[in-house]
């Protein structure tokens, strides 16, 4: 059964996964896009729990399912904005490091896109 746990739970899990302090990610709680996703998913979770279930899945009529799909689409668009923000910050930082002749720090994560060219193999 699905249970939406709210932004802090998911931020804490990502902090552990990415090797970041929880305090650093808690600063993201106020992010507008993340807040919209969280609010919309909270509403969808209420719909889920109010609907009859078959094999753990909510059973809804087609018009309600269309509304749910539209809401998830809105969440996907917010996620796209967050990816764009992260990729933009990464590009700006790389450009600044280059401008000062500094080596860009190695990051444990990056934003990738299906249209990116394959990365050159890393020499060891």
Image (cartoon, grey):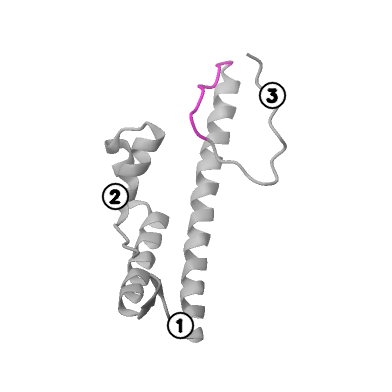
Does residue 27 appear in this view? no
At 34% from the left edge and 69% from the top edge, which residue is drawn? 45
Q: Are marks 3 and 1 in contact (CB under 8 Å)?
A: no
Q: What residue sits right under mark 2 in the picture?
A: 9
The image shows residue 68, relative to residue 27, as above or below, that is below
Q: Quadrant of the N terminus?
A: bottom left
* Residue 9 higher or lower than 18, as above or below: below
Q: Dominant secondary structure of the magenta stretch?
A: loop
Which residue sits at x=55%, y=26%?
96
Query: In the image, what residue occupies the spot 28% across and 50% down?
Result: 8
Q: Which residue is denoted by mark 3 in the rendering?
A: 121
Query: Magenta segment, which residues?
Result: 101-109
**What whole-number distance in Å separates the C-alpha atoms at marks 3 and 1?**
48 Å
The quadrant where residue 34 appears: bottom left
Name the side, left or right, on which 71 lies relative to 114: left
C-alpha gap between disc 3 and disc 2: 36 Å
């Amino acid at each position: 059964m699905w249970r939406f746990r709210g932004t802090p739970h998911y931020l804490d899990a990502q902090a552990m996964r990415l090797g970041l302090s929880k305090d650093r990610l808690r600063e993201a709680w106020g992010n507008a896009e993340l807040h919209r996703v969280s609010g919309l998913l909270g509403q969808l979770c209420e719909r889920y729990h109010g609907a009859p279930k078959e094999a753990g899945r909510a059973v809804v009529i087609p018009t309600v399912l269309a509304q749910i799909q539209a809401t998830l689409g809105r969440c996907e668009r917010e996620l796209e904005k967050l990816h764009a923000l992260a990729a933009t910050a990464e590009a700006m930082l790389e450009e600044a490091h280059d401008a000062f002749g500094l080596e860009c720090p190695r990051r444990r994560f990056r934003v990738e896109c299906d249209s990116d060219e394959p990365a050159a193999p890393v020499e060891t």
